[in-house]
Amino acid sequence: MPAKRKPREYYEYGSAARKYETYETKNNISKRSKQAKTKVQAKRKLANMSTVVVILCFFAMAMIITYRYNLISEKNLNSQKLKKELEEVESALITSQIDVEQNTDVSQIEAYAKQQLGMQKPDKNQTIYVNTTNGIQKLEIEETTSGIENILSQIVEAIKNIF
């Protein structure tokens, strides 16, 4: 076998002595180095993957925060638009109320009713007075008493009717 080797591989130059290595030791060393390389490569792949996952997580969180900010901004804009519309409607309402108050003149309404509609003031014999004080008092009494007091008052009245 040494004859098959090239002279440069067989001889070592310098002050070091010749090193003989058997075929088995070279295989063991190469297997060990391959296993070590694969372990190192696996660790590097794992480190690279964890870095990519962390970057993706940060990106996802940033996108979620941006999306939520966008929703809040939209809601705020809609709120501002609705407030502006409300102010416009309120100002229109106030303007119309002022117009109604300015155009409401009792003498003009009376003149319109007499001339255009043919209305006239009622005479004494056309006026009917209705006494509503009794109905109001009964309603006030019924509203002030509670359910339990109503039941107790009905029981007391029933006992009075018996005797």
Image: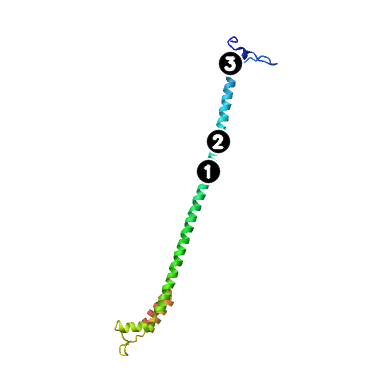
Q: Residue at x 56, y 30 (%)?
A: 41
Q: Return the disc, 1 or 2, that comes first in the chain's sequence.
A: 2
Left or right: residue 117 versus residue 136 is: left
Please provide percent x and percent y for residue 94.
Answer: 44, 72
CA separation, marks 1 and 3?
50 Å
Q: Return the disc, 3 or 2, that comes first in the chain's sequence.
A: 3
Q: Looking at this view, is 138 or 70 the one in front?
A: 70
Please provide percent x and percent y for residue 129.
Answer: 34, 87
10 Å crowding of disc 1: few (<14), some (14-19), many (20+)? few
Q: Residue at x 54, y 41 (%)?
A: 55
Left or right: residue 121 versus residue 64 is: left
| Element type at mark 3 | helix
Q: Amino acid at mark 2?
A: Asn
* Residue 23: mark: 3
Please provide percent x and percent y for residue 123.
Answer: 31, 89
Instruction: Give the residue furthest to the right.
Output: 15
Instruction: Give the residue furthest to the top.
Output: 3
| Element type at mark 1 | helix
Quarter that holds the N terminus: top right
Q: Looking at this view, is 40 or 161 the one in front?
A: 40
Q: Amino acid at mark 1?
A: Cys
Q: Looking at this view, is 33 or 11 the one in front?
A: 11
* Residue 48: mark: 2
CA separation, marks 1 and 2?
14 Å
Residue 49 vs 85, above or below: the answer is above
Residue 2 vs 56, above or below: the answer is above
Q: Quadrant of residue 9?
A: top right
Task: Nearest to the eye among marks 1 and 3: give it.
Answer: 1
10 Å crowding of disc 3: few (<14), some (14-19), many (20+)? few
